[in-house]
Amino acid sequence: MYRKLIKLSILTAMSSVLATEQFLPHLEIYTGGYNVLRSENYFMVGLNYTLKQYDYFSVETGGFISDKDMYYLHIGPRFTYKRLFVSVGPGYYHQGQGLDLGRDLEFKSEVGLKITKNLHIGFFHLSNAGTDDYNPGTEAAYIGFSGF
């Protein structure tokens, strides 16, 4: 229980450090369900930060934690066209007491839709992309907030 509170405190501290006027427009906070297409679901909370933004392309880094001591940290490209965005990239996955995905190296494939300027919904898939014989993969659905 204490580990969860420590991780949540670190996530909150990171977001408050980034939450200056200069960094704020590039910060997204999201929450939702993890492992949503299976019977055992988990709660998750996470954040994404856009490091560099061009017309349709940006570099995104971020991560999430879940209620079973799982966490995932990633970096990769993000493509945006009007209200639709897609991101892909590698990351580090820590299983904790939750879902075994086969490896620590997992790849995130995400698609999202901006509902309003500051509200978006999304869906992502985590998988080790066949780099291990055991590759169950998992999905998550979330609602996100940005540009506070």
Image (tube, helix red, strand yellow):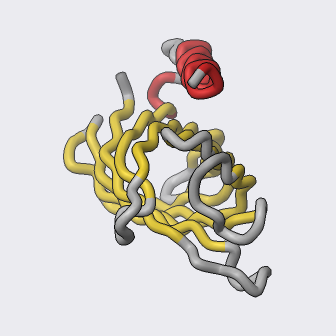
Task: Say whether residue 138 is left or right of residue 122.
Answer: right
Q: Is residue 79 visible?
A: yes
74 up-or-down from 117: above or below: below
Q: Position of residue 128 (x, y in %)?
A: 69, 74
Task: Say whether residue 8 is left or right of residue 81.
Answer: right
Q: Position of residue 91 (x, y in %)?
A: 71, 56
55 up-or-down from 19: above or below: below
**The N terminus, quarter of image:** top right
Q: Position of residue 69 (x, y in %)?
A: 61, 40
**The C terminus, quarter of image:** top left
Q: Residue, x 61% and y 46% (percent of image)?
A: 70
94 up-or-down from 128: above or below: above
In the image, 4 versus 85, the foreground residue is: 4
Q: Residue, x 66% and y 63% (percent of image)?
A: 89
Q: Position of residue 46 (x, y in %)?
A: 50, 38
Q: Residue, x 43% and y 34% (percent of image)?
A: 29
